[in-house]
Image (cartoon, grey):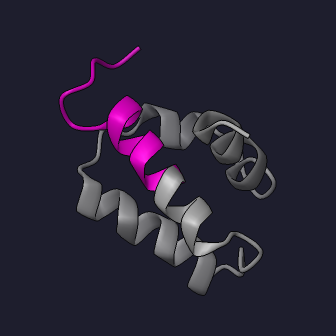
Amino acid sequence: MSSEQLFETHCGACHDLELPRSQRLDRDTWRWVVDDMVNKFGATWITENQQDRIVDYLTENYGPDRPRP
């Protein structure tokens, strides 16, 4: 499964994906967001490896240097 598919499948299981796609956050903030979703909101089925891949995907595609749609 690609990193994009991990993001769409796991993050989209709980909420609309337009909000994260509209954000332009740095790696540390994306890490905080993913940690919050797992630890505070219960997305505990997402493995640490999958979390890392999702953070990488979000940083690469929705980082502070990426243009907004």
In the image, farthest residue toward the left: 65
Q: Position of residue 19 (x, y in %)?
A: 53, 41
At x 56%, y 66%, the residue is 49
Determine whether, in the image, residue 22 is placed left or right of residue 59. right
The image quadrant of residue 16 is top right
Q: Position of residue 58 (x, y in %)?
A: 43, 43
The image quadrant of residue 38 is bottom right
At x 29%, y 61%, the residue is 29
Regarding residue 18, the answer to whether it shows in the image is yes
Determine whether, in the image, residue 68 is placed left or right of residue 28. right
In the image, farthest residue toward the top: 69
Q: Is residue 49 above or below residue 68?
A: below
Image quadrant for the N terminus? top right
Image quadrant for the C terminus? top left
The image quadrant of residue 45 is bottom right
Query: Is residue 63 within the magenta segment?
Result: yes
Query: Is residue 60 within the magenta segment?
Result: yes
Magenta span covers which residues?
54-69
At x 44%, y 65%, the residue is 33
Q: Position of residue 23 (x, y in %)?
A: 38, 39
Q: Is residue 10 above or below residue 35?
A: above
